[in-house]
Image (cartoon, rainbow, N blue to C red):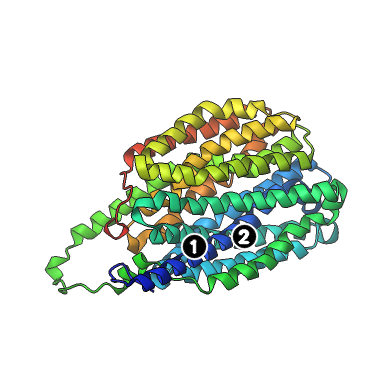
Amino acid sequence: MITATTTATPTSLVKADKATLRSIRASTVGNILEWYEWSSYAVFAPFIAAVMFNPANPVSALLSTLAVFAVGFLARPLGGIVFGRLADRKGRKFILITTMLIMAGGSFFIGIMPTYATIGVWASILLLLTRLVQGFAHGGESAAANTYIAEIAPASRRGMWSSIAFIAIFAGSVLAYVIGGALTSVMGENVVTEWGWRVPFLLGGVLALVALWMRRGMIESDVFDSEVNEVPADKPTPSANPVVPDSTRRYSLGKTIVLIVAMTSGITAAHYTWTSYVSTYAISHQGMTPSSAYWMVVIAQTVALIALPFWGRLSDKIGRKKLLVMFAIFMIITQLPLMNLIDNRPWTLLIASTVALVIVAMSGAILSAVMSESFPTKYRTQGIGFAYSISVAVFGGFAPYINDQVIAWGVGWMSSVYIMLLCVATLIATTLLPDNTGVDLNKV
């Protein structure tokens, strides 16, 4: 392993590059699988609702399914704090392996879980508990993954490299939708409802073993190593470390956390609406066939996925804040007309979701870089874990439920207004955050 201060020979530099690339692949593949497992629940929500909740009231069953999806996010802040603190002490690699194990176990358990017809309400309770455990692990995984990629990236290309974190999110979601489209096309809705919905969860548990094997060989980030191994030249005297700077640091960290929560609120609400909910909306409320809805979202997310590194590289050139401002303004303008465009014709979902997701990608590509450049190394993972998880739990995880609930109340337009208002919060927070594009992470 080469630290930030090592003078390397050309050979060792090649080895370091190979080790870094191998670590990026391992982190990304594992992150894709974790997001695939997480997204599969939302993709198969209409089928899960039919078998894990009381089928006598389909509307209530779907709302209950989306409520469990939302409640799973409530465990993410706790996971972000616990695993984030461990990551700042034991390293990013340790957490990325641990959370992978927990998510894989939860996915496999959902795949073999008894249904409502077998054990009644206990099926719903078991599903809820499993999602809580997965949410706990997911909070730690997201924090460590966002930190890890940003820390091993070259400062001048941190935006482009950090887009890998969101590429994994989109790739995991695309994989879930591809499997959803394939299963509904080949098996048909009845078979998928009967047992086919279990396939993606069982598959996720098995594929996680491959990711775990890859993650064993990951290197630790140099930024973390240099922080841990740093030895001060002169030991400070008690008078050289007064109470005032400590209280100032606590205040600045608290302010940063609040701003990150506000900044990510619009991003995460828009993201989960257009990735996790839009297919359910098209299927359950517009009468679109599941296979058509799934394949349209696959195409839209693939286009957005391709755009991510380009947005990240642009941020390295013009700065992160400009891209965040562009995202917020574009989302405020387009959210309502894009949602109103969707009906039972597949092309309407394709156009609406493609435009929306390319806009979301504008902010998602740089989210890891922005958050990592906002916290000092000593507190980076736990700061990101808490702030990001709080925002995702409150504004992202509940977005599908809020969308469906206001539709049930007959005021579906309110969900778009909700996202637009959160994007205003993103815009305000962005103006208050410093633009640390390309800064040395050890000097934040």
Secondary structure of residue under mark 1: helix
Q: Residue at x 68, y 33 (%)?
A: 349
| In this rendering, the label closer to the viewer, 2 or 1 | 1
User: Is residue 226 rendered to the left or right of residue 368?
Assistant: left
User: Is residue 166 rendered to the left or right of residue 409?
Assistant: left
* Nearest the eye: 124 or 223: 223
Circle 1 sits on which residue? Answer: 24
Give the vertical position of 200 relative to 260 (above or below): below
Q: How many marks?
A: 2
Give the vertical position of 222 relative to 359 (above or below): below
Kindly indicate whether the residue at mark 1 contacts the one at mark 2 (C-beta within 8 angstroms).
no
Secondary structure of residue under mark 2: helix
Q: Label 2 sits on what residue type?
A: Leu
Marks 2 and 1, the one that precedes in the sequence? 1
Question: What quarter of the picture does the C terminus occupy?
Answer: bottom left
Question: What quarter of the picture does the N terminus occupy?
Answer: bottom left
Q: Is residue 265 visible?
A: no
* Nearest the eye: 394 or 424: 424
Characterize the local packing of mark 2: few (<14), some (14-19) or many (20 or more) Cα atoms within 10 angstroms: many
Q: Label 1 sits on what residue type?
A: Ile
> Residue 238: where, in percent of width, then height?
15, 71
> Residue 194: where, in percent of width, then height?
85, 54
Q: Residue at x 52, y 48 (%)?
A: 392
Q: Which mark is residue 33?
A: 2
| Marks 2/1: CA–CA distance | 14 Å
> Residue 227: where, in percent of width, then height?
31, 68
